[in-house]
Amino acid sequence: MANEAKPCPCDIGDKIDYKGLGEEVQIEHIKAYVVKPPATDKAIIVIQDIYGWQLPNTRLMADMLSANGYIAICPDFFVGKEPWNPAHDLLSTWSTFQEWLEDRKPTDIKKEVDVALRYLKEQCGAKHIGVVGFCWGGVATHYVALQYQEIKAAVSVYGIVRDREDTFDLKSPTFFIFAEKDEYIPLDQVTILEKRLKEKCNADYQMKIFPNQTHGFVHRKREDINPDDKPYIEEARKDMINWFKKYM
């Protein structure tokens, strides 16, 4: 990894009072939020940020995908473990984040991805499956795109960049969304990722940096969309949908 993992606030202060349009279900050993449109064989696995599968902002994204014709499932990739809560750190320095992350690695999710895939195929009749993730989930999405040929399309949204030899041979078409003013992902790391992908990746990919935006902007709460940010937030969400439409 190009730098030590750092905590990413992802606008926890923007947590919205949003109940969601779907339902919580138990699928094998994990719980999941699922929202289904009328008859479709297309589905998206939505991967949470560090604030967990129940964060209303992430469920808003799942509902948005469902409104565009996709079954959306947001599993609890922490498998019952508590999501990050900066209030646990009384000094507010995030000094315990690395310890918290030890048993919640975004690359240690294969068992849960396999459960979600089985559910979507066997219980929902899905034949075309994609994945999108935010922050922690952006890293996880990058991992899934490296491992699963059956994933038709992936969108990694401000996932911290890992500069390792095993992170460039994508199996799935992948769209990377970054923010120009992301405190946690320096633009030189994004440049390195693009360079390595050009050298080693055979799958389709695209990278896009949104000007003047900060970490968490795509799933920021609706009430906090100011006039300057709103066009970029809407453009990023539209790009996400268009990527899935193109490959699914």
Image: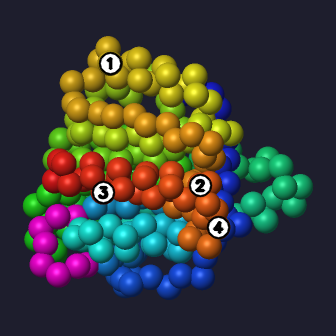
Instruction: Look at discs 2 and 4 and give the one toward the viewer.
Output: 2
Query: Which of the two labelled residues, at mark 4 and mark 3, occupies the earlier sequence position?
Result: 4
Tell me, yes or no, whether the two marked residues, 2 and 3, touch with CB atoms within 8 Å: no
Q: CA distance from mark 1 to mark 4?
A: 36 Å
Q: Is residue 77 magenta?
A: no
Query: What amino acid is labelled 3 in the image?
Result: Ile
Determine crowd level at label 3: few under 14, some 14-19, many 20+ residues with C-alpha closer than 10 A.
some
Query: What amino acid is labelled 4 in the image?
Result: Asp
Identify residue for label 2: 229
Query: What amino acid is labelled 1 in the image?
Result: Lys
Q: Is residue 26 above or below residue 231?
A: below
Q: CA distance from mark 2 to mark 1?
A: 30 Å
Q: CA distance from mark 4 to mark 3?
A: 22 Å
| Quadrant into which the N terminus falls | top right
Q: Residue furthest right?
A: 91
Query: Which of the two labelled residues, at mark 3 and mark 1, occupies the earlier sequence position?
Result: 1
Identify residue for label 1: 198
- From the top left corner, tell me how far across and down residue 228 is, in percent: 62, 54
Determine crowd level at label 2: few under 14, some 14-19, many 20+ residues with C-alpha closer than 10 A.
some
Question: Residue drawn at (32%, 18%), measured in percent from left and top?
Answer: 198
Q: CA distance from mark 2 to mark 3?
A: 19 Å
Q: Is residue 42 magenta?
A: yes
Name the residue nearer the viewer: 193 or 95: 193
- From the top left corner, tell me how far across and down residue 229 is, in percent: 59, 55
- From the top left corner, tell me how far across and down residue 199 is, in percent: 32, 14
Question: Residue drawn at (29%, 72%), measured in percent from left and top?
Answer: 66
Determine crowd level at label 1: few under 14, some 14-19, many 20+ residues with C-alpha closer than 10 A.
few
Does residue 51 appear to the left or right of 148 in the view shown?
right
Query: Which of the two labelled residues, at mark 2 and mark 3, occupies the earlier sequence position?
Result: 2
| Start-end of magenta stretch | 36-43
Identify residue for label 4: 224
